[in-house]
Image (cartoon, grey):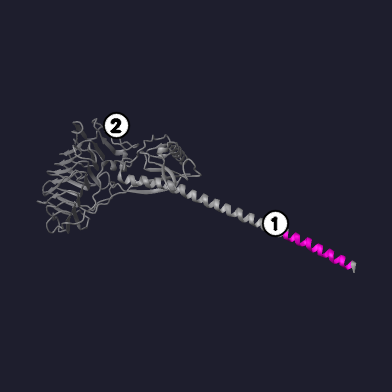
Amino acid sequence: MSRRRTFLDRLRRDDEGFGLILVIGFGLVLTALVVVATTLSTRAIQSGQRHVVFAQSADAAEAGVDQYVARLQKNTTYAPVSLAQPAAFDGVSGWSSPTAERDWARQTLTTMAATASNLQTVPQGQYIAIRPSWTNTIYSLGWAPSFAKATRTRLIKSEYLFSTYHPANAILTNGDISCCPSYNVGNASGVSSVISIHTNGSLGGVPSPANGETVTASATGSCSSPCTSGTAKQSVPVIDPEQVYKADASKYSAAWYDLCPDGKAHKPDLTNFVPCANSATWPSTNGWSASGTPPNMTWDASSTPSAGVYYAYKADVTVDKTDMTNSVTVITESSNNNACPKTDGDITVKQSDWSNGSTHTPYIPGLMAVAGGSFYQTTQTTMRSGAVLAQGSVNQHTSAQDYLQGLLIAQDLCGESNDLQGSILYYDGGDDLPIAPLVRTTLELELN
């Protein structure tokens, strides 16, 4: 009996030891699970925090791009910080390598950030953005949560261009139009369109159809039937010669002539796109002669200019008894560009045939003349084919057999009125024109 009790006691003792082992084992397993779960949770939280900071740095950099785009909408030359063009960047071929571009942008922005007043703060972090005047690119570097305590940075590059403008009217002006003794409008050959005329001022009459076309006329101010008065204003684009310079000087640099105050024809400035800033000159003025000095300077087409773009800076242009038989585009910039009053920048064409020989096309497609002042077509003059734009007014006084083939747009910046009589406008439908200050982003990528 005692022997059996001893055996049972030993079994009980063994069971108690085994139970203890099980309890300890389960405790260790549960502890391990808790540790693993805690580790995974901690890592998930840290990963989430890193993702949030990563996104915040990107959002901060994006805020810099958005700020610059908004300011460029108001001022196409906005670049408050002057940045020297590095050797690694060429005005024609661009950057020597993506690495050179990234390193220059990051170093430049980081150096600027050392001055606290340069930093812009948003809820997501801080940023600095720049737009070098020598390229249509915005660089923005964002830090999160701040520059001083940055755990993440993002460098963004955004390339942009200024959208073109497609005219919808044969004649569009901001100011009044005096019209229309012996003034006709019609469609150019191959164009079938309702011919639309609009002024944000008052219209003194409605041109007669040249060949039975349908003509619609409207005015924000007063006008007589068949014109519709009291209509809503239409948007007249800003006629800024410097905008055309920035858009096209590089593209047409092989035949772009800056007609400058020193009486010489300079090659275009492809670095900062400032008219007459390039000291290099062409061998000759290429058919143009200068008289006077700004703001009383005039460039005359003294002989037939060869094909090209002629940009008269702080001067008037006169084409008098000179036939433009080559493809040319003429642009003037007044001494008081985008401001009033005007002292120069007019284009006057008289007793000339501006028909561009057999091609009938301007050098910049669709763009025949851009006046930083006003445009005047007078006395036995034929012009074709393209848009005539003026920061001031547009005026046609020729004779019944003379005409302009293209379209007319007048910004009337200084309150000018437009005068149309004794001529014909043949509407050519219009081309996309590089004059609108609307920013369109073409590329955005991260340089990190």
In depth, the one of 194 and 237 nearer the eye is 237
Image x and y of residue 355, in percent: 20, 45
- Extreme residue in the left direction: 181
Q: Earlier in the sequence, mark 2 or mark 1?
A: 1
> Of tags 2 and 1, which is closer to the observer?
1
The amino acid at mark 2 is Thr
26 shown above or below 270: below
Whether residue 287 sits left or right of residue 113 in the image: it is left
In depth, the one of 5 and 428 nearer the eye is 5
- Extreme residue in the front direction: 2
Q: In the image, what residue occupies the spot 44% across and 36% down?
A: 114
Q: Main secondary structure of the magenta part?
A: helix
Whether residue 89 sits left or right of residue 399 in the image: it is right
Instruction: Please count the marks in the image.
Output: 2
Q: Quadrant of residue 357?
A: top left
For disc 1, the marked residue is 28
Q: For residue 100: magenta?
A: no
Image x and y of residue 25, in percent: 72, 58
Q: Secondary structure at mark 2?
A: loop
The amino acid at mark 1 is Leu
Image x and y of residue 345, in percent: 20, 39
Q: In the image, what residue occupies the spot 81% across and 65% down?
A: 12
Q: In the image, what residue occupies the spot 39% across and 46% down?
A: 65
Q: For residue 13: magenta?
A: yes
Whether residue 358 sits left or right of residue 134 in the image: it is left
In depth, the one of 357 and 56 nearer the eye is 56
For disc 2, the marked residue is 281
Which residues fall within the magenta stretch? 3-23
